[in-house]
């Protein structure tokens, strides 16, 4: 289990940490292949990211998108390019 915050990986969503989604701070998740920048304050919970991800890296929890694909994301960038609010930014880590 990890922690929340800029530059700190988090791997398991806990119901008690939902307040962080509403804190107004950008979330940065880091995995082996991908670094995700996401602004939950601007998320409208539309579920587009869930619908376009071919390997189920996203889910909508209490009206906000949650990324759980830091280890399985294949960097197709569908979530980034299709998000109507343009609040998802993926970065490839390493080669």
Image: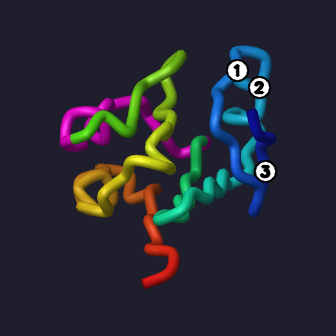
Q: Residues within 10 Å of mark 1 (few under 14, many from 20)?
A: few
Q: Residues within 10 Å of mark 2 (few under 14, many from 20)?
A: few
Residue 45 at x, y = what percent? 41, 29
Residue in the image at 50% along x and 81% along y: 94
Q: How is the image coloured?
A: rainbow
- Report which quarter residue 52 is drawn in: top left
Judging from the image, what secondary structure is the residue with disc 2 in? helix
Looking at the image, tell me whether mark 1 or mark 3 is earlier in sequence order.
Answer: 3
Do the residues under discs 2 and 1 have CB atoms within 8 angstroms? yes
What residue is disc 1 on? 14
Q: Quarter holding the C terminus?
A: bottom left
Judging from the image, what secondary structure is the residue with disc 3 in? loop
Q: Nearer the viewer, residue 78 or 11?
A: 11
Q: Nearer the viewer, residue 62 or 3?
A: 3
Rendered view: 34 above or below 68: below
What residue is disc 2 on? 17
What residue is disc 3 on? 5
Q: Which residues are magenta?
A: 41-54
Left/right placement of residue 13 relative to residue 1 reads left
Q: Is residue 53 magenta?
A: yes
Looking at the image, tell me whether mark 2 or mark 3 is earlier in sequence order.
Answer: 3
Residue 59 at x, y = what percent? 40, 27
From the image, state whether disc 2 or disc 1 is nearer to you: 1
């Amino acid at each position: 289990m990890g922690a929340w915050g800029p530059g700190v990986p988090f791997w398991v969503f806990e119901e008690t940490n939902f307040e962080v989604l509403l804190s107004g701070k950008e979330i940065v998740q880091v995995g082996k292949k991908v670094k995700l920048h996401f602004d939950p304050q601007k998320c409208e919970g539309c579920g587009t990211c869930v619908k376009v991800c071919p390997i189920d890296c996203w889910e909508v929890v209490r009206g906000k998108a949650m990324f759980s694909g830091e280890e399985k994301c294949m960097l197709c960038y569908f979530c980034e390019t299709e998000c109507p609010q343009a609040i998802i930014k993926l970065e490839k880590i390493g080669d």
